[in-house]
Image (cartoon, coloured by chain):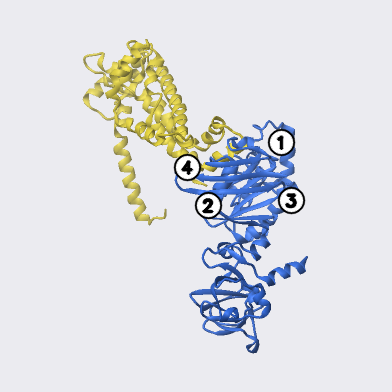
């Protein structure tokens, strides 16, 4: 069942330029839905429109199947976690968690029971008498989370809740939020600018850029079949390597950035789009290391990052693009080295050279998906 | 702050000196209130013999206790009124969105540039028309709203993250509940500051009580002081000073109590 639905939603502050354009979206009950995009893309505005904190300029918003454009926030049956947690500094943790329950006419015993249950679930039992200023960032985050859980609202909105935490804590909270959401069967709309968060947490992701929907889909679909070059470079870390490609020699040869040549096999030619000029994209993990005799190309190293279990290598000299490769294990190369690599056309995604839209995803990737099933 | 010993000595000497200079008139008044009229006219600094005569005389000559009571009552009325009205106005200027909010606020603040003396005649006519001459409400009414207080509290309320308002909105708390349960407790220190300030300025009012009262039943203590001075041809300075000491006591008490609260409030606000 659809929990939230948006039909042609737009938002404008000055009645001239739209910060959000014709958003169409439906979010199912119990779904963990992530809104992701760079800063200023309108994702927070969209979330605030769902919450009722921001007016909707045009379009229709329904919550639980009922039009909600003009419903006040308290009647939308939702809870929200803010980026800065929005804890009341003069109240204790307990009072913070229970804030608002008295308005909802929850009786005393029920309040007590819910508090105990929530505090146990989130691990706040020992902190209930403290003030927010006596808590660490992670603990404050938990209080904010508890406040939203205790309200028993079926829909939970989160606006970059983890961006003030350090990397380790963030990873831990990611898992915890996900676990909580599953356990309680919450419908979650989660805003983030961090594509790792989006990939790891979301059932479905919507990528927004400049107020327009770029793509909606499962994380793995977004990764394998990005709808355009923006999604390709936004989702995945490191970003997808992109380059201008041109078909030469009556379609038997592909040349990328006037530098890398690929002879096309018969099978390649079946899968390749017929366009003369395209933008190709290839993931960093598909630039394989190769011994000299099996190398397809030799590339110059611009930078190396050793992560221990894998090595991130940045190549230069492919037009003005920097390409990166992710090799598992430890590779002792240094900037300036020329390294043999193996690149295969079967891993290329093809995008329209003009508007950047996906023409064809990598056919190797697709066949893998079939095998996995 | 760490200072070398010599620097410390100089610093404390300077501080002591300026404190003595500042405090000298009060000290002088204090001693004078205990001397006979002979000593006062001779311009002695310390009384040759200590006496409470002046205090007895001051209380005998005027209903000082009545004046004190009036002053306390009116100052409290003005203080409470200012706290209520300016906090509500400041809330509106921060948390309610309406057209022309900023313009209205600047207009509001601009009234600070008009001295009270300039508006004293219309005020007097208003109070007279309302038949409030010689009443407590008449004394307090013109001071219940204050642009300064609104300005001060608006600045404090602006420090409150707007997310707190939004979170309460989602929790289902209306404006008034949010004002009572969140804004006021958070802005406690500023409220205390404003409260003390408005109490003291109300306490020290002279011109308005003089105009709007005609009998001792509602007069304030500042008018009483003036009456002490002018009743005789030769001023009995000892009596006047005794009266002044009595008048100063409540102010001092308030400052002593307030200071502690004020410091606590300020410290609370500083930690985030």
The number of discs equals: 4
Q: Position of residue B148 (x, y in %)?
A: 37, 32
2 and 1 marks in contact (CB < 8 Å): no
User: Does residue A7 lie above or below B130 as drawn?
Assistant: below
Q: Nearer the viewer, residue B24 or B107?
A: B107
Does residue A101 appear left or right of residue A243 in this picture? right
For mark 1, name the chain.
A
Between the C-alphas of marks 2 and 4, the distance is 30 Å
For mark 3, name the chain.
A
Q: Which chain is yellow?
A: B
User: Does residue A114 lie above or below A22 as drawn?
Assistant: above
The residue pinned by badge 3 equals: A182
3 and 1 marks in contact (CB < 8 Å): no
Between the C-alphas of marks 1 and 4, the distance is 31 Å
Between the C-alphas of marks 4 and 3, the distance is 37 Å
Q: Earlier in the sequence, mark 3 or mark 1?
A: 1
For mark 2, name the chain.
A
Q: Position of residue A222 (x, y in %)?
A: 64, 61
Q: Earlier in the sequence, mark 2 or mark 3?
A: 3
The residue pinned by badge 1 equals: A111
User: 10 Å neighbourhood of mark 1: few (<14), some, or many (≥20)?
Assistant: some
Between the C-alphas of marks 3 and 1, the distance is 23 Å
């Amino acid at each position: 069942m659809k929990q939230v639905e948006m039909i042609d939603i737009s938002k404008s502050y000055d009645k001239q330029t739209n910060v959000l354009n014709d958003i169409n979206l439906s979010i199912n009950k119990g779904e963990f839905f992530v809104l992701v995009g760079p800063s200023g893309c309108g994702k927070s505005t969209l979330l605030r429109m769902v919450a009722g904190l921001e007016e909707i300029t045009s379009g229709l918003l329904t919550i639980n199947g009922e039009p909600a454009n003009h419903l006040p926030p308290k009647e939308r049956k939702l809870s929200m976690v803010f980026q800065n947690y929005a804890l009341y500094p003069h109240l204790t943790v307990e009072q913070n968690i229970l804030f608002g329950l008295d308005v909802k006419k929850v009786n005393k015993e029920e309040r007590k029971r819910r508090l105990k249950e929530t505090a146990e679930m989130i691990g706040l039992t020992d902190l209930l008498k403290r003030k927010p200023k006596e808590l660490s960032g992670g603990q404050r985050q938990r209080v904010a989370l508890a406040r939203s859980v205790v309200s028993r609202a079926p829909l939970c909105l989160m606006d970059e809740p983890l961006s003030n935490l350090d990397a380790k804590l963030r990873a831990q909270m990611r898992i915890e939020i996900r676990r909580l959401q599953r356990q309680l069967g919450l419908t979650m709309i989660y805003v983030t600018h961090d594509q790792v968060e989006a990939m790891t947490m979301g059932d479905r992701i919507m990528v927004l850029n400049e107020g327009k929907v770029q793509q909606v889909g499962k994380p793995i679909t977004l990764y394998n079949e990005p709808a355009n070059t923006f999604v390709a470079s936004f989702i995945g870390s490191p970003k997808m390597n992109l380059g201008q490609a041109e078909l030469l020699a009556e379609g038997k040869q592909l040349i990328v950035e006037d530098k890398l040549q690929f002879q096309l096999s018969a099978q390649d030619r079946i899968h390749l789009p017929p366009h003369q000029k395209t933008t190709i994209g290839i993931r960093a993990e598909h630039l394989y290391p190769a011994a000299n005799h099996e190398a397809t190309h030799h590339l110059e190293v611009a930078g190396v990052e050793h992560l221990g279990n894998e090595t991130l290598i940045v190549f230069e000299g492919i037009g003005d693009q920097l390409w990166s490769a992710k090799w598992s294990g430890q590779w002792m190369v240094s900037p300036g080295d020329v390294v043999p690599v193996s690149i295969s056309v079967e891993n290329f995604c093809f995008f329209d050279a003009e508007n950047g839209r996906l023409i064809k995803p990598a056919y190797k990737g697709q066949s893998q998906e079939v095998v996995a099933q | 702050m760490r200072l070398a010993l010599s620097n410390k000595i100089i610093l404390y000497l300077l501080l002591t000196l300026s404190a003595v200079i500042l405090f000298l008139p009060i000290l002088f008044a204090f001693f004078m209130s205990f001397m006979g009229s002979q000593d006062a006219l001779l311009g002695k600094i310390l009384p040759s013999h200590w006496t409470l005569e002046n205090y007895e005389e001051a209380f005998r000559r005027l209903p000082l206790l009545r004046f004190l009571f009036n002053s306390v009552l009116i100052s409290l009325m003005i203080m409470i009124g200012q706290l209520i009205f300016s906090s509500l106005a400041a809330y509106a200027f921060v948390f309610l969105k309406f057209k022309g909010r900023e313009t209205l606020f600047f207009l509001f603040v601009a009234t600070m540039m008009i001295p009270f003396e300039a508006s004293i005649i219309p005020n007097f006519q208003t109070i007279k028309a309302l038949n409030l001459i010689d009443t407590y409400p008449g004394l307090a009414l013109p001071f219940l709203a204050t642009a300064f207080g609104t300005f001060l509290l608006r600045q404090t309320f602006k420090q409150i993250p707007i997310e707190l308002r939004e979170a309460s909105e989602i929790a289902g708390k209306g404006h008034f509940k949010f004002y009572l349960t969140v804004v006021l407790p958070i802005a406690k220190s500023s409220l205390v500051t404003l409260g003390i300030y408005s109490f003291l300025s109300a306490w020290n009012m002279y011109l308005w009580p003089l105009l709007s009262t005609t009998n001792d039943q509602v007069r304030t203590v500042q008018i009483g002081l003036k009456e002490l001075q002018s009743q005789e041809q030769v001023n009995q300075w000892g009596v006047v000073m005794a009266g002044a000491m009595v008048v100063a006591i409540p102010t001092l008490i308030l400052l002593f109590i307030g200071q502690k609260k004020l410091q606590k409030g300020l410290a609370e606000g500083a930690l985030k």
